[in-house]
Image: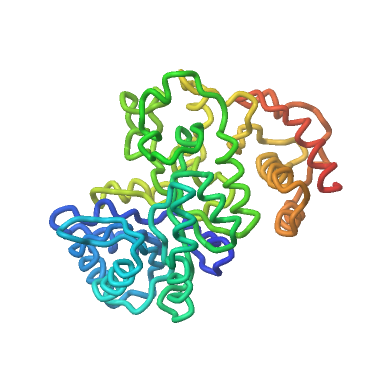
Amino acid sequence: MIYRDLGNTGLKVSEIGMGCEGFAEDNCAMTKKIFDAAEAAGVNYFDLYTSNPAVRTAVGEALRGRREKFIAQSHICSVWQNGQYKRTRKLKEVVAGFEESLEQLQTNYIDVGTIHYCDALDDWQRIVTGGILDYARELKAAGKIRHIGLSSHNPQVALAAVESGAIEVLMFSVNPCYDLLPASEDVEQLWAPENYEAHLTNMDPDRQRLYETCQRCGVGITVMKCFGGGDLLNAELSPAGVALTAHQCIHYALSRPGVACVLAGAHSVEQFKQSVAYETATDAEKDYAATFATFPKISWQGHCVYCSHCAPCVKQIDIASVTKFLHLAEAQGGVPETVREHYAALKHHAGECIQCGACETRCPFGVAIRDNMRKAAEVFGY
């Protein structure tokens, strides 16, 4: 298992994590089985957005005797009332729901306390001014949560939260189809077939800016909806019109700036193990670029997706990493210290490019790689 830094939190998280969708399967008997499989595979991160007390109790039982082996991302503002889930911004309900969750999980702290499901800018303002953010800060000061997070599907809202400096972790929906759609306060638009009827081209700039800002600011991204609820794995359901594999979806998400962990939903231990098998998959099995190039409804022409099809470089330059750092610097309008240091750590740099163009003959998307290398050499100075 590969472990990544979760932004600036100081936490080292497995790049494959557990989504909680399958925990409720078989009257919650599946919970312990998935945790057992996770521990065996070295998976140390999980998300618990659900407020279902049966699921929380099952997770608490699964964690018994091994709490310190797992990093818990659990949600504030997700509560259970009248036998059903409810998202609330009423502080009294939020406080009661969080305290109840600690009891059910048999723990006295949550590693990442995630403010639940904020997809509208006015809702973010309610969180900031209505006591929710202050409560999260109180929980952190008391040691009941270690870090403050937010879950969102809207890049404009997520960007506002990240730039405020209030959150340390962002749970966000990342996959190659959602990344093409502009921001919306209606999460259902991510699934709406009519939004994919026209020919879509390249990543929405708000989403690219969000990922780059997270990496620059040290806000770790944990990924939800990596498989689009399973739709991307089915050619008939996929908005792209072509099926992707689980390995391709995971690799795409892990290639985005700022991403630390993909939360793989699974309805069985076998499904979970299929996601974990990403760690031993070949480069060919992970490769999403060739499939992207066949999408009948989507084009990534001229846009670098960091797929590394341009390799090998005759000067051994890691072209995808250089391009990613270039984009981060361009988004900032300068070279942040962290980007400068990551660029410096590369074994070879853009200034070594001899402009042979061999890389461009291999790029499936027609990216002007030589121009990017020239720009990077100018921006970084070598």
* Coordinates of residue 375 in the picture (x, y in percent): 80, 37
Residue depicted at 85% across the width and 47% down the height: 382
Residue 175 shown left or right of residue 86 in the figure:
right
Q: How many marks?
A: 0
Q: Residue 196, how many percent across, how many down?
A: 42, 24
Name which quarter of the figure residue 76 lies in.
Answer: bottom left
Q: In the rendered view, does 53 fall on the left or right side of 328?
A: left
| Position above or below: 1 against 197 | below
The image shows residue 35, relative to residue 135, as above or below, that is above
The picture quadrant where one finds residue 372 is top right
Q: Is residue 67 left or right of residue 306?
A: left
> Is residue 42 in view from this perspective?
no
Q: Nearer the viewer, residue 143 or 240?
A: 143
Residue 31 or 201: which is nearer the viewer?
Answer: 201
Quadrant including the N terminus:
bottom left
Relative to 68, say whether 189 is above or below.
above
Residue 305 visible within the image: yes
- The part of the image, by quadrant, that contains residue 30 is bottom left
Colour setting: rainbow
Q: Left of 315 or right of it: where is 233?
A: left
Where's residue 139, x and y in %?
43, 75
The one nearer the camera, 70 or 55, is: 55
Tell which residue pokes out farthest to the left in this image.
Answer: 27
Residue at 37% x, 47% y: name it: 275
Q: Nearer the viewer, residue 366 or 211?
A: 211
Q: Which residue is at 36% across, 25% downward? A: 193
Location of residue 376 in the rendering, given as x and y in whole percent from the top left corner: 79, 41
Residue at screen point 50% across, 27% down: 292
